């Protein structure tokens, strides 16, 4: 035996009716309404008779009344359930509070974003209050499952999540990428990620996706902002994230130039969702969205996601095109002028290189002469020393010591010549090298010190030395300046010592870019053809004079090291001479 009870709906008039159709007995329970005939649609019971009973088995009145009351109770329950499921005075939405542009905090700490505008519009259309709460992502997921929140939005669909949530039909696309620091290269697929620690947002779809593919060296962070800040501080070098919030925070923290991105690891869809099995709530929310037009939703998307630039033709483009053409013509003209100037600069540079080559050739010739002169000048005293040493030895053997003292004096004199030559060569080698840092120096003080050191040289010589008072200061290495002043004054003493009324003048004057120091004498003078050669190595106009011929070469080398010039002016033999040199000016 079996009995089947069916619940259906009818709109009928009249009283309880019984009909037999295909061996089934139907009971219709009408409900009269005052002032109107007929009855409302009500669920009724359908009974299928027990097999084996007569085709028209009468149903007892008690059973009919029981059916009537049972069906009425079922109808009342279903109606109440339907009324309780649909009407709501408030729904609660939870989301990640660091997921721009969907939801994030503005500078005042207020929650703003695409979700706030969308759910506010839903609330206005449906007359139902909506509360949007930002949470850590893991907390938002759990509050939905615990029933503390009605809806979570947005949520990326995954097979694992579909076991806990019912997802909406509406969705928007999203892709996830790996972002890595510029110092790293070769990141392009899952295999290239292994061995690195990758930052992820806690409980994110990105972390689940990586875990499913065997990438388990993950460092999770509660919020997207903390994840990007960890990357900025160097705590992690790679992180996985949905592209929109990642690009937002990288740009906001000015890190977009420090990180690169891979192609999308995967593309998915973002939905709003409710707890699994809460179909009444899902249907209620979805029905509310039908009251919002696609245009209104698109306007909210464009407000937070932006929109493509219009591709319309603007008449101003003609103006811009004309200006561009003029710019090209001007650019061509500028290019021609620049090319001409470049050619001139190349020609000047070529001439400069030619001058440098000539200088090197001159230096090379000077070096060859230097080598020859040194070998000759050093060989002469060595021959003298060797010869007189042999003479002394022979005198000792013969017992004849009459010339012993004379021979020793000649050996000593030759040794003095060699020592002077070596000292001058050493000074010459140092002339192009700074000993100490340049500083402001008083020329009067330097000249006074040099003259004081020459008292032995001036002893017995009737030479008047006149020093200009209040000479300007210069900016040089003190030791190098002493070498210049000393060699110029020694040179003047050397060539005036035989003249009557010998006089030497030392002074200086200012020029816009330098201090010109000079030493003037009324001695032998120099013919014009020798004005340049006197600064060469070992050049002495009078071979009988003392010295090695290196002093003026040292002066030139020091002055040229400071970018200056040294020269001589003289009217010829017996007319005296004046040596000038440029010294750096203070300031």
Image (tube, rainbow, N blue to C red):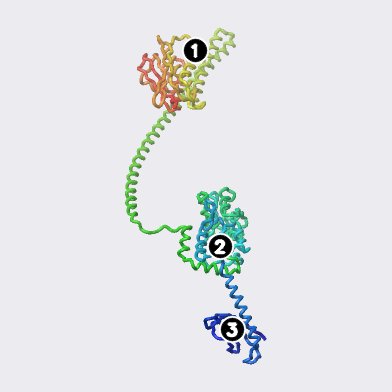
Q: From what the image shows, is residue 82 above or below residue 556?
A: below
263 and 569: which is toward the camera: 263
In the displayed structure image, the side of residue 326 where residue 435 appears, left or right: right
Q: Nearer the viewer, residue 382 or 559?
A: 559
263 sits to left or right of 541: right
* First in residue order: circle 2 vs circle 3: 3
Q: Is residue 275 above or below residue 521?
A: below
The image shows residue 229 at horizontal and vertical percentages of 57, 50
Judged from the image, the secondary structure of the residue bearing numbered disc 1 is helix
Q: Which residue is mark 2?
A: 156
In the image, 584 versus 241, the foreground residue is 241
Q: Nearer the viewer, residue 460 or 22?
A: 22
Identify the residue under disc 3.
29
Q: Is residue 178 visible?
A: yes
Q: Does residue 442 sit above or below 394 in this rendering? A: below
- Tell me the crowding category of disc 3: few under 14, some 14 to 19, or many 20 or more residues within 10 angstroms, Cα based: many
Considering the image in quadrants, where does the N terminus appear? Answer: bottom right
For marks 2 and 1, give the one nearer the viewer.
2
Q: Residues within 10 Å of mark 1 (few under 14, many from 20)?
A: few
Mark 3 or mark 1, whichever is nearer to me: 3
């Amino acid at each position: 035996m079996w009995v089947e009870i069916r619940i259906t709906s009818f709109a009928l008039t009249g009283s309880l009716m019984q009909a037999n159709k295909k061996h089934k007995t139907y009971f219709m329970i009408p409900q009269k309404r005052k002032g109107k005939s007929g009855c409302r649609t009500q669920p009724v019971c359908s009974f299928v008779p027990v097999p084996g009973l007569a085709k028209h088995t009468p149903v007892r009145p008690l059973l009919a009344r029981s059916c009537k009351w049972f069906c009425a109770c079922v109808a009342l329950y279903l109606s109440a359930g339907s009324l309780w499921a649909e009407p709501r005075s408030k729904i609660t939405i939870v989301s990640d509070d660091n997921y721009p542009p969907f939801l994030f905090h503005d500078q005042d700490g207020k929650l703003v974003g695409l979700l706030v505008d969308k759910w506010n519009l839903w609330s206005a259309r449906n007359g139902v209050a909506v509360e949007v709460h930002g949470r850590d992502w893991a907390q938002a997921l759990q509050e939905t499952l615990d029933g503390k929140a009605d809806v979570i939005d947005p949520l990326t669909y995954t097979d694992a999540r579909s076991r806990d949530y019912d997802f909406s039909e509406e969705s928007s696309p999203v892709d996830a990428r790996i972002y890595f620091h510029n110092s790293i290269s070769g990141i392009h697929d899952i295999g290239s990620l292994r061995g690195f620690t990758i930052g992820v947002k806690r409980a994110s779809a990105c972390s689940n996706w990586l875990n499913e593919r065997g990438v388990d060296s993950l460092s999770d962070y509660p919020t997207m902002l903390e994840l990007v800040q960890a990357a900025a501080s160097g705590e992690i070098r790679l992180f996985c994230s949905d592209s929109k919030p990642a690009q937002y925070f990288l740009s906001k923290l000015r890190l977009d130039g420090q990180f690169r991105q891979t192609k999308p690891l995967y593309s998915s869809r973002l939905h709003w969702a409710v707890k699994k099995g809460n179909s009444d709530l899902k249907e209620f929310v979805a029905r509310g969205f039908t009251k919002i037009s696609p245009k209104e939703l698109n306007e909210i998307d464009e407000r937070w996601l932006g929109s493509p630039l219009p591709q319309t033709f603007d008449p101003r483009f003609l103006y811009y095109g004309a200006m561009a053409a003029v710019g090209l013509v001007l650019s061509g003209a500028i290019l021609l002028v620049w090319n001409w100037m470049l050619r001139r600069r190349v020609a000047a540079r070529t001439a400069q290189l030619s001058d440098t080559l000539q200088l090197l050739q001159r230096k090379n010739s000077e070096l060859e002469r230097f080598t020859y002169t040194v070998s000759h000048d050093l060989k002469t005293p060595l021959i003298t020393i060797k010869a007189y040493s042999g003479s002394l030895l022979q005198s000792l053997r013969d017992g004849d010591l009459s010339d012993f003292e004379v021979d020793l004096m000649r050996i000593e004199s030759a040794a003095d010549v060699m020592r002077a030559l070596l000292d001058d060569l050493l000074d010459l080698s140092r002339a192009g090298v700074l000993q100490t840092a340049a500083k402001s120096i008083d020329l009067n003080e330097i000249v006074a010190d040099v003259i004081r050191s020459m008292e032995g040289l001036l002893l017995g010589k009737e030479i008047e030395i006149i020093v200009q008072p209040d000479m300007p200061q210069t900016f040089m290495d003190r030791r190098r300046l002493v070498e210049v002043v000393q060699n110029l004054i020694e040179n003047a003493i050397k060539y005036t010592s035989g003249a009557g009324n010998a006089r030497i003048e030392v002074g200086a004057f200012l020029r816009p870019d330098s201090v010109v120091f000079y030493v003037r004498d009324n001695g032998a003078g120099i013919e014009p053809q020798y004005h340049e050669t006197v600064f060469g190595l070992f050049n002495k106009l009078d071979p009988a004079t003392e010295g090695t011929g290196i002093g003026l070469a040292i002066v030139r080398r020091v002055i040229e090291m400071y970018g200056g010039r040294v020269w001589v002016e003289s009217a010829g033999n017996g007319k005296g001479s004046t040596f000038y040199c440029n010294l750096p000016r203070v300031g």
